[in-house]
Amino acid sequence: MTETLHNLYLGFSVALSPGVLLYAFIGCVIGTLVGVLPGVGPLAGISLLLPVSFGLDATSAIVLLAGIYYGAMYGGSTTSILMRIPGEAASVMTCIDGYAMTRKGRAGPALAIAAVGSYVAGTLSIVALMFLAPPLASFALRFGPPEYFALLLLGLLVLAYMSGGSMLKSLAMAALGLFLGMIGIDPMTGFLRFSYGVIELGDGIGIVPVAVGLFGLSEILLTAGQPTASEVVRPRLRELLPSRAEWRDSFWPIGRGTVLGFLVGIIPGSAHIISSFVSYAVERRLSKHSERFGQGAIEGVAGPESANNSATSGAFVPMLALGVPSGPIPAVMIAAMMVHGIAPGPLLIAHQPELFWGFIASMYVGNLVLLILNLPLIGIFINVLRIPYPLLYPAILIFCVLGVYAVNGSVVDLGIMTAMGALGYMLRKFDFETAPVVLGLVLAPMMEMSFRQSLSMSSGSYGIFVNRPIALAMLIVGLALLLLGVVPFVMKRAAWRQRLGFSAQEKESA
Amino acid sequence: MTTDRVSGSVLVLFALAVMWESRLLPLGTFRQPGPAYIPVLLGILLLVFGVSLVLTGGRAPRLSSVSWTEWRHALAILGTSMFSVIAIERLGYRLTVLLVLGFLVKVVERRGWALSLALAFGLSYGSFFLFYTILRVPLPQGPFGF
């Protein structure tokens, strides 16, 4: 405990130095803007500034990029509540009750609860990250390739089980993503796979072009031609305060959302998106008046918004303690750390204490900055949304092009982005989820490597995955999830997803 | 024909293509996987998922129920995105962005000349100044110095 406090003191002395503080602030502002703009997710924002971060020292770079990540979680809620447009994917559930509250003239309290919930969840989950990451890192020193393989497989299965649509489709998309990750040099034998003479493909397909294409470009393709003339409500500052009853109703959802989000965040997967879905479903089930959900229940804003922020910190646990990217954004952040010669993994905390603790402390500071930034300045950020979409989307397209090109200076990456945009457009038309594709791509190299290394270790015996208790435990959980997903399918019963949150969403969109 | 049956069939074709293309690489053995082992395994998985989708997709929405109202915009945006792939290193960043924005705002969205030109020039030169000059992100310049 004293050691942690001492380390935290070290962290704050790093985080409160003017340079780092400035980058945390810039990251938060850009993150909020990126979160507000539909079609530009945190990943496009991070990739835009990735080349900029190369010129900074490692701590400032990581603080800047993390600021964008959690800033976007705050910003995304604004458009969901006011316009029913999720600024980024994690805010989809906030749209339902948040927008219903706006129609009832309670936009201010919805925004305030979203910001306060995000702040509370953000701060508490950093405390958890602070206490959990170091012991996990020392525990992870016992992890060998079989454990890593089991963990990554578990991550993919959790994502497939938890994501909204059919598990079959999600698994198919995860397999597609894993296949995309096979393109390029095989690290164990040096064979070039599926690169067809394109030199740039030898290095493999980048995460940024795929993710920006699948999430950003496909969003523009889907919405640009739609007649969207939704009106922007601009709340006044004194209308922001929630009533006493609203505070009371939000208290437990914020607490539950925090714990739930953090737990979901730790498992590799598209944590912040899943966590908000699960939190909404849980709140709806626990509520004594579940019929209010979809009609403007503040619990439906408080829970998911807290959960997605908490999941952001949760996602940093495997990234910092294990060096495992828990999604596309941590993967890009790991790449940024590697540019600075830092290898994330179990030894990071011991070898780079000022980076780890400076990062933790800067997240405390960043959350406070965001709370201050979000409530009074909400009116200013909303002005961005007053720009008609026909003028906004060409600019968003340019940001996507700029962000993807800037990372490697490669036109092949732009080509991949365009192809993935078209693929994402078709996939979404046919009701497929795109998140598992990106996660598959992110995890593929590490997963294949650990699989083949495990077999080398055991001279080809597959028993290595079941003889080691940690790996076995993770595989059993994964198998259980797979069975849970298959049983309702076989028994012809509606899945739990339909019975909980999703029925509300369908009703809303109908 | 339902959406799931169509997408399942596409997955099946893709899976077969993956397996066919993997024949060029050494497969290895069950105990010692080679570079083609995991791709073939994924191909088989994709095949299984595709066939399952075809078999179970009878109750999915019909293909004709998918709305394509925005296809003109989508095609125009994809076209400009492809154009930027070809043009960005040949014409330079500013000229490419200028043309992309000019086309989207003036031709696709049918806005006035003044607005189109202001947006195209402002954003192409503005973003270049911010990222290239201030933030020192390397961006390509074309033969005309743009």
Image (cartoon, coloured by chain):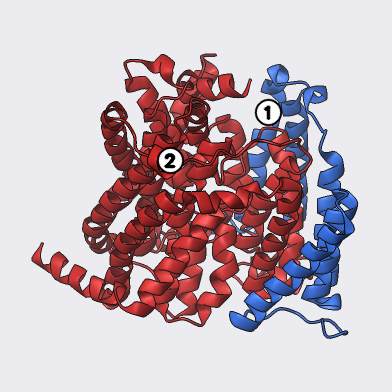
Chain colours: A red, B blue
What's the residue at 39%, 17% (across, down)?
Answer: A290
Q: Which residue is mark 2?
A: A111
Few, some or many C-alpha atoms within 10 Å of disc 1 (few <14, some 14-19, many ≥20)? many
Q: Is residue A133 visible in this depiction of the protein?
A: yes
Q: Residue type at mark 1?
A: Leu
Q: Quadrant of the N terminus of chain A?
A: bottom left
The chain to which mark 2 is attached is A
Work out whether residue A96 or residue A467 is closer to the camera in this orientation and state it.
A96
A261 lies left or right of A159: left
Pointers 2 and 1 in contact (C-beta within 8 Å): no
What's the residue at 51%, 14% (across, down)?
Answer: A493
What's the residue at 40%, 68% (across, down)?
Answer: A24
Residue A7's image quarter?
A: bottom left
A110 lies left or right of A116: right
Q: Quadrant of the C terminus of chain A?
A: top right
Q: Give above or below for B91 relative to A216.
A: below
A482 lies left or right of A433: left
Q: Hey, which residue is sitting farthest left in the picture?
A: A2
What's the residue at 35%, 63% (across, down)?
Answer: A320
Few, some or many C-alpha atoms within 10 Å of disc 2 (few <14, some 14-19, many ≥20)? many
Q: Which mark is residue B53?
A: 1
The chain to which mark 1 is attached is B
Q: Residue type at mark 2?
A: Leu
A439 lies left or right of A71: right
Q: Which mark is residue A69?
A: none
Q: Nearer the viewer, mark 2 or mark 1?
A: 2
How far across and down, in percent of the image, does residue A460 sit?
Answer: 46, 56
How far across and down, in percent of the image, does residue A494 sit?
Answer: 52, 16
How far across and down, in percent of the image, does residue A304 sit?
Answer: 41, 37
Q: Secondary structure at mark 2?
A: helix
Q: Secondary structure at mark 1?
A: helix
